[in-house]
């Protein structure tokens, strides 16, 4: 039995494919993480399929993500034997609860470094392993006392296809800051991680050396 092909588009889940002669239904499952527990979120029947495709709307909490997959069943209630791990698709929801997908992987290795005059530099890495779509840019959100505004990024850094990236900003001495960086696809789909790193600006920090000379022996 061929597994049920599927894809995802905003603002919902569109399950694409066809029913084999021995298929009677396709069940759509959701889980909060790749290794999380499954929740049945909908069933597609042959009558739901028109022109080779069916539609099932998936909803989620604002700024959240989940993993979704489809599984085919026969009239005897025998399911397809393909591992769900090969079917899983990560989907994310924006601040209005609309589905945005596919999305890039979330950045990793976030580090904040203090500089002179209240300068703070955020560095991070991007791991493209198993990504569904490459990032076109990264959006940086900074909380310096008023909370995060995910409608208005404080900075945008273009993705170059490399691994390491950085962004910086200057604050008054003693300002406590929180930073979140998110990857964004060329279609504008933004993944929704909320991993925050924190640092307090130090405007009294000494200037860094302009250069370092070393004698080669």
Image (tube, rainbow, N blue to C red):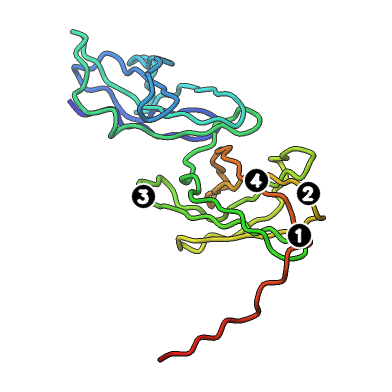
Residue beneath label 1, please? 118
| Separation (CA) of disc 4 from disc 1 | 14 Å
Q: Image height check: is 157 above or below 35?
A: below
Q: Nearer the viewer, mark 1 or mark 3?
A: 1
Residue beneath label 4, please? 198
Q: Residue furthest right?
A: 172
Q: Residue at x 18, y 24 (%)?
A: 81
Q: Specify which label sits upstream in the sequence, 4 or 2.
A: 2
Q: Specify which label sits upstream in the sequence, 1 or 2.
A: 1
| Separation (CA) of disc 1 from disc 3 | 35 Å
Q: Residue at x 54, y 51 (%)?
A: 110
* Residue 175 disc label: 2
Q: Specify which label sits upstream in the sequence, 3 or 4.
A: 3
Which structural element holds mark 4?
strand
- Give how far across and how far down residue 211 sits, in percent: 61, 81
| Separation (CA) of disc 4 from disc 2 | 11 Å
| Separation (CA) of disc 3 from disc 2 | 36 Å
* Residue 129 disc label: 3
* Residue 54 disc label: none
Q: Dot 3: within a 10 Å radius of its alpha carbon, few (fewer than 14), some, or many (20 or more) residues?
A: few
- Please state, as top left, top right, bottom left or bottom right, where the C terminus lies in the image: bottom left
Q: Image height check: is 202 above or below 4?
A: below
């Amino acid at each position: 039995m061929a597994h049920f092909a599927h894809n995802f588009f905003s603002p919902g889940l569109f399950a694409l494919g066809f029913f084999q002669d021995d298929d009677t239904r396709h069940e759509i499952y959701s889980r909060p993480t790749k290794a999380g527990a499954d929740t049945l979120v909908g069933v597609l029947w042959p009558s739901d399929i028109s022109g080779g495709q069916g539609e099932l709307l998936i909803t989620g909490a604002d700024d959240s993500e989940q993993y979704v997959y489809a599984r085919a069943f026969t009239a005897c209630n025998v399911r397809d034997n393909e591992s769900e791990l090969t079917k899983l698709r990560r989907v994310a929801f924006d601040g209005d609860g609309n589905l945005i997908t596919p999305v890039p992987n979330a950045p990793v290795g976030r580090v904040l470094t203090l500089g002179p005059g209240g300068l703070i530099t955020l560095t991070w890495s991007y791991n493209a392993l198993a990504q569904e779509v490459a990032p076109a840019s990264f959006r940086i959100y900074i909380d310096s006392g008023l909370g995060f505004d995910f409608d208005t990024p404080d900075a945008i850094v273009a993705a170059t296809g490399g691994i390491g990236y950085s962004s910086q900003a200057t604050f008054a001495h003693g300002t406590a800051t929180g930073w979140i960086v998110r990857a964004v696809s060329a279609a504008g789909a933004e993944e929704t991680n909320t991993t925050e790193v924190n640092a307090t600006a130090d405007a009294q920090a000494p200037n860094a050396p302009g250069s370092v000379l070393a004698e080669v022996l």
